[in-house]
Amino acid sequence: MLYFAALIEQLIMTSISANLQAVRERIAAAARKYGRRPEDVSLLAVSKTWPAAYIREAVAAGQNAFGENYVQEAVEKLGELAPLQLEWHFIGPLQSNKTRAVAESFAWVHSLDRLKIAERLSAQRPDGLPPLQVCLEVNISGEATKSGVSLTALGELAAQVAALPRLALRGLMAIPAASAECAEQRVAFAQVREAYEQLQNSGLRLDTLSMGMTHDLEAAISEGSTLVRVGTAIFGERRQS
Ligand SMILES: *Cc1c(COP(=O)(O)O)cnc(C)c1O
């Protein structure tokens, strides 16, 4: 039995490395197809629900940036993996009673959608660390999800967040409603890109469009994504969300 457990472990590890390679190739192929440079699209490996051992394997295969959604789960893994000096991105819904752990342990937050949370993160960001890098999550699916700032409220929130001393506003993040159609996916991503360009034109210096996951990264890259957040295609199907 022990032997089989070790064998299965070995198979999982080998597949993480091969999966990462395949995802990198998908990103590069999409970038070339849409006239962009592959190096202008970075890969965030979404490791939520997966153990630290899987993350170590991705690190061995050259991956350095990881995304987590649940504060408690993340804090445990971050502690365990601290010697590896990885770049951690918080991408899940954030409640005000959890902001301190995020402000103290993460380099990035992608899911910021309220001024109150932004103010807490800025106040709680330790002086010894660089500013917390943040993206505002935009809600482009209307009622489909509760998270994300509406396009109409985006400009005001962006100006307020940009003024906070311990945050660096880098761009926008979005999770459009799932669709199997690339053309449909592109419509939603194009809305985010237009909002991003409007903010740039208003004078904000933004460089990050965080959009695209396992099933829609090509459409996201076609609309200017600079960072795709990929979980399933690297680590496999999750049992929980
Ligand atoms: C889980 C999650 C992902 C990864 O999704 P996959 O479909 O597994 O690639 C990306 N972004 C966010 C915000 C997530 O919660």
Image: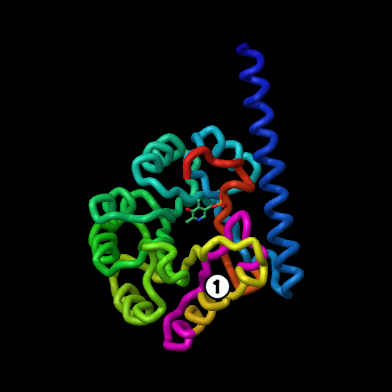
The structure residue drawn at horizontal position 27% and vertical position 69%, both measured from the top left corner, is 115
Above or below, comparing residue 190 to residue 40 in the picture: below
Q: Which residues are magenta?
A: 198-220
For residue 171, say whether it is visible: no
Q: Is residue 19 above or below residue 195?
A: above
> What is the x, y in percent for residue 179?
60, 63
Decide which of 77, 69 is in the foreground and name it: 69
Residue 101 place in picture, x, y as percent: 30, 48
What amino acid is at disc 1? Ala
Q: Which residue is mark 1?
A: 188
Q: Is residue 3 magenta?
A: no
Residue, far front: 143
Where is residue 227 shown, x and y percent of the image?
56, 63
Query: Is residue 47 in sight in this rendering?
Result: yes
Using the image, determine if residue 15 lies above or below residue 99. above
Residues 138 and 124: in front is 138
Q: Residue at x 38, y 74 (%)?
A: 150
The colour style of the image is rainbow
Q: Is residue 47 left or right of residue 92?
A: right
* Mark 1 burial class by Cα count in 10 Å: few <14, some 14-19, many 20+: some
Q: Answer with left or right where residue 29 lies relative to residue 198.
A: right
Q: Nearer the viewer, residue 138 or 226?
A: 138
- Which of the image's four quarters has the N terminus? top right
Ligand 1 closer than 8 Å to label 1 CB: no
Residue found 27% across the figure and 62% down from its top: 117
Residue 45: x and y in percent read 56, 50
Image check: 121 left or right of 215? left
